[in-house]
Image: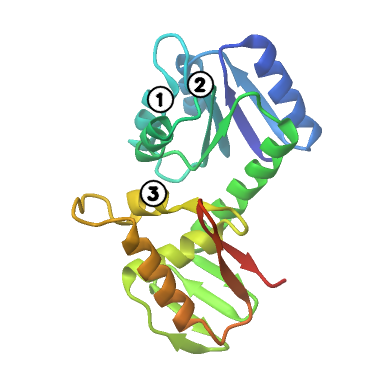
């Protein structure tokens, strides 16, 4: 059974989240601090971590940084009352996979956990299949109906990211932060250029569309 670790110092909210996760058929373990979370992580297997940011002692982002020092792959979702880009960027740079703003809708949280688990399976297999399109992360190559589509490393990474989270919108700033890290001279316009190149290369492919979400960014929408 999938085991979800919930780290939240508000005991009532912790219970609500754990109850919702258990109702969805998963196992949930509640912790009230990062210290308790580490004890559970060391003691046994955990498949997903759902954590608050603001906690006494070590906060959620510091906890994520510590976890990422020893485990690069476990899916981590942060919950927070702050809905500003600086907090989100700090979280993603620390190594989180997703982010939700309080008050938390438990049904949406379950959907996001399912998406994180699907993403983890894709990561483990290093292979993503959408209809007749296959992306192989080990080869860094893409195929449609067995024919290779030539992509640069950055084009491949952007497409792999979008297709790994179908129908989820990524802002230009998020994509820039992940795939142009350290390139201070790059502008958000560079994201548009790469999206256009990817669309051109897959113009004959009917397995998915890369949709512009005006004012926000881009998302990949599979045809089936």
Q: Is residue 2 visible?
A: yes
Disc 1 marks which residue? 63
Which type of secondary structure does the marked residue at label 3 adopt?
Answer: helix
210 left or right, relative to 38 = right
Q: Are marks 3 and 1 in contact (CB under 8 Å)?
A: no
Disc 1 is placed on an element classified as helix
Q: Tell me the residue that label 2 is attached to.
A: 37
The percent coordinates of residue 90 (x first, y second) are 36, 33
Question: Residue at 64% of width from left, 41% of height from top?
Answer: 113
Q: In the depicted view, which residue is nearer to us: 208 or 73?
A: 208
Marks 3 and 2 sit apart, C-alpha to C-alpha, by 31 Å
Tag 1 near tag 2, CB within 8 Å: yes
Indicate which disc, 1 or 2, sits on the residue closer to the N terminus.
2
Q: Residue furthest front?
A: 215
* Element carrying mark 2: helix
- Which one is earlier in the sequence, the residue at label 3 or at label 2? 2
In the rendered image, which quarter is residue 154 located in?
A: bottom left
Q: Quadrant of the N terminus?
A: top right
Estimate how packed mark 1 is, as few (under 14), some (14 to 19) or many (20 or more) residues with alpha carbons within 10 Å: some
x, y percentage for residue 208?
Answer: 61, 73
* Vertical side of 112 occupied by 132: above or below: below
Residue 158's place in the image compared with 61, above or below, is below
In the rendered view, how is the structure colored?
rainbow
Q: Which mark is residue 173?
A: 3
Q: Quadrant of residue 112?
A: top right
Pointer 3 and pointer 2: residues touching (CB < 8 Å)?
A: no
Count how many numbered circles sit on residues in the image.
3
Q: Quadrant of residue 58?
A: top left
Instruction: Tell me which residue sits at (66%, 27%) in the image.
Output: 104
């Amino acid at each position: 059974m999938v085991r979800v670790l919930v780290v939240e110092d508000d005991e009532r909210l912790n219970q609500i989240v754990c109850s919702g996760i258990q109702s969805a058929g998963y196992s949930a373990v509640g912790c009230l601090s990062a210290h308790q979370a580490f004890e559970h992580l060391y003691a046994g297997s955990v498949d997903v971590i759902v954590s608050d940011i603001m906690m006494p002692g070590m906060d959620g982002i510091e906890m994520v940084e510590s976890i990422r020092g020893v485990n690069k792959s476990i899916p981590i979702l942060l919950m927070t009352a702050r809905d500003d880009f600086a907090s989100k960027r700090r979280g993603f740079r620390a190594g989180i996979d997703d982010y939700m703003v309080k008050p938390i809708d438990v049904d949406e949280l379950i959907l996001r956990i399912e998406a994180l688990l699907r993403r983890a399976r894709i990561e483990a297999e290093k292979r993503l299949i959408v209809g007749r399109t296959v992306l192989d992360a080990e080869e860094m190559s893409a195929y449609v109906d067995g024919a290779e589509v030539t992509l640069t490393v950055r084009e491949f990474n952007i497409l792999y990211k979008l297709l790994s989270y179908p129908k989820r919108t990524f802002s230009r700033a998020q994509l820039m932060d992940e795939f142009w890290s350290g390139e201070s001279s790059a502008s958000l316009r560079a994201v548009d250029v790469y999206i256009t190149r990817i669309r051109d290369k897959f113009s004959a492919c009917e397995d998915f569309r890369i949709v512009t979400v005006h004012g926000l960014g881009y998302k990949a929408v599979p045809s089936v």
